[in-house]
Image: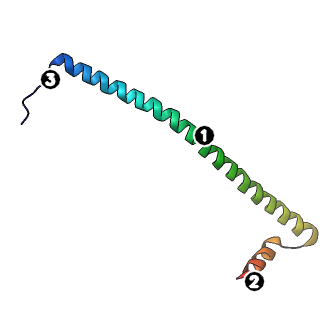
Amino acid sequence: MNTYRPTQSSNYWMVALKLLILILGLYISALVLGKVFTWVFAITFFLIRLIVLLAVSFIVLHFFLKVLFKLDLFQFVMRKIRTLR
């Protein structure tokens, strides 16, 4: 059993040192994670924009082909996918 008890003044210094280390660690992690999340969010935003652009383009093309030529693009694509199997 350890019977050492720190004096009251050294205990304050240890708490202050631990708080300083905590603040420094949080600051460094914010700097590093800020750069990482910037890239992650940029790539994710680009992929979402690309997927939405392709989906909207397909829907608009499907609509115009159906109205103008009575061609169902969705069924046409599904038939082509089934024949590839």
Identified at 57% across, 41% down, the residue is 37
- Check contact, mark 3 vs mark 2: CB within 8 A: no
Amino acid tagged 1: Thr
Say which residue label 2 marks: 83
Quarter-of-image position of residue 72:
bottom right
Q: Secondary structure at mark 2?
A: helix
Q: CA distance from mark 3 to mark 2?
A: 79 Å
Q: Nearer the viewer, residue 81 or 10?
A: 10
Name above or below for residue 73 compared with residue 17: below
Identified at 72% across, 50% down, the residue is 49
| In-image side of 9 versus 5 (left or right) | right
Quarter-of-image position of residue 17:
top left
Say which residue label 3 marks: 6
Q: Nearer the viewer, residue 79 or 60?
A: 79
| In-image side of 69 versus 17 (left or right) | right
Identified at 80% across, 62% down, the residue is 58
Q: Which of the two labelled residues, at mark 3 and mark 2, occupies the earlier sequence position?
A: 3
Q: Which of the two labelled residues, at mark 1 and mark 2, occupies the earlier sequence position?
A: 1
